[in-house]
Image (tube, coloured by chain):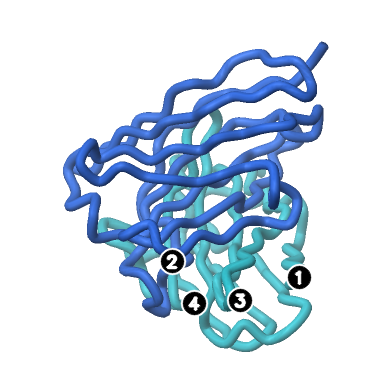
Amino acid sequence: QVQLVESGGGVVQPGRSLRLSCAASGITFSSYAMHWVRQTPGKRLEWVAVISHDENDKYYADSVKGRFTISRDNSKNTLYLQMNSLRAEDTAVYFCAKGDYWAAARTGVSFDWGQGTLVIVSS
Amino acid sequence: EIVMTQSPATLSVSPGERAILSCRASQSVSNNLAWYQQKPGQAPRLLIFEASTRATGIPARFSGSGSGTEFTLTISSLQSEDFAVYYCQQYNSWPPMYSFGQGTKLEIK
C-alpha cells in the first residue's frame, strides 16, 4: 500500500520561504521519479516539478523556475520542495505524487498521490 | 507549452447512463495522456494512462481512447460514486513540462 504524506504547509507572507516534505512508504522510493503538483483555489491542477530517482535530473514549471527547488533524500524516503520568494499566486494545495521510472515514457504519470498540504501566501 | 482543453465544463448525466468527456491538446501528445478523478476533499486518483490503459483497480466501465490531439474518457453505466471532477493531463513534453486540462465536473442529472 503506497502512502505519501505531505507536511510543512501554512500561512506565509509574500517574499518569504517555506519547505514542504513528503514522506513515502510502501514503495521502493529510490526507484521512482517523484512530482509536486499543486491545486489552486479555483481547483486548477498545475504540475510544479519532477525529480529523477537519483536526484540527477530536476525540471520545473516556468511559473516556479528559479524560486522553487525539488530535492529528495532516498535514505529517509522523503521528497522536499523548497519554496522561496513566495507570491500570492503560489497559494494552493501542494500534492506529492509518485511517477514512474526515470525517462520511461510514463515518467510524467502521477500513479499515486498524497492528501496534500495547504500553502497560503498572504500578508 | 501544450495547452489542454476539456469539454464540457459540466456534464449532467443520470445514473446508469453513459458519460463521454473530451480532452483536446494544442499539439500532438501521441498517446501520452492520462485521466484523473477527484472527489471533494480528496486527492486526484489515476484512472487511465497511455490514453487507454486502466490503472490498477479501476473498473472496466472506465475507458479511454484517442491519440494525437483528441481524447475521450467514457464511463459506461454511471454509478453514484462516479460523480466527481475529471482531469486530463499530457506528459509527452520533453524536457518535462506537463500540463493539465481545466477539468470536467460530472454531476447527477
Label 2 vs label 3: CA separation?
A: 18 Å
In which quarter of the view is residue A86 placed?
A: top right
Q: Say which chain is blue.
A: A
Residue position for label 1: B1
The secondary structure type at the circle numbered 1 is loop
The secondary structure type at the circle numbered 4 is loop
Q: Nearer the viewer, residue A98 or B103?
A: A98
Q: Tell me if A33 is positioned left or right of A77 in this view.
A: right
Q: Count residues near mark 1 (Cα–Cα under 10 Å), then give few for <14, some for 14-19, many for 20+.
A: few
What is the x, y in percent for residue B64? 49, 74
- The type of residue carrying mark 3 is Ser
Assess whether mark 4 and mark 3 are in contact (beta carbons under 8 angstroms).
no
Q: Nearer the viewer, residue B37 or A27?
A: A27
Mark 1 or 4: in front is 1
Q: Nearer the viewer, residue A72 or B78?
A: A72
Residue position for label 3: B93
Label 1 vs label 4: CA separation?
A: 20 Å
On the same chain, marks 3 and 4? The answer is yes
What is the x, y in percent for residue B50? 44, 77
**Could you tell me which residue is drawn at 52 percent across and 83 percent down?**
B31
Label 2 vs label 1: CA separation?
A: 22 Å
Specify the quadrant that holds the C terminus of chain A.
top right
Q: Chain of mark 4?
A: B
Report the disc number at residue A14: none
Residue position for label 4: B51
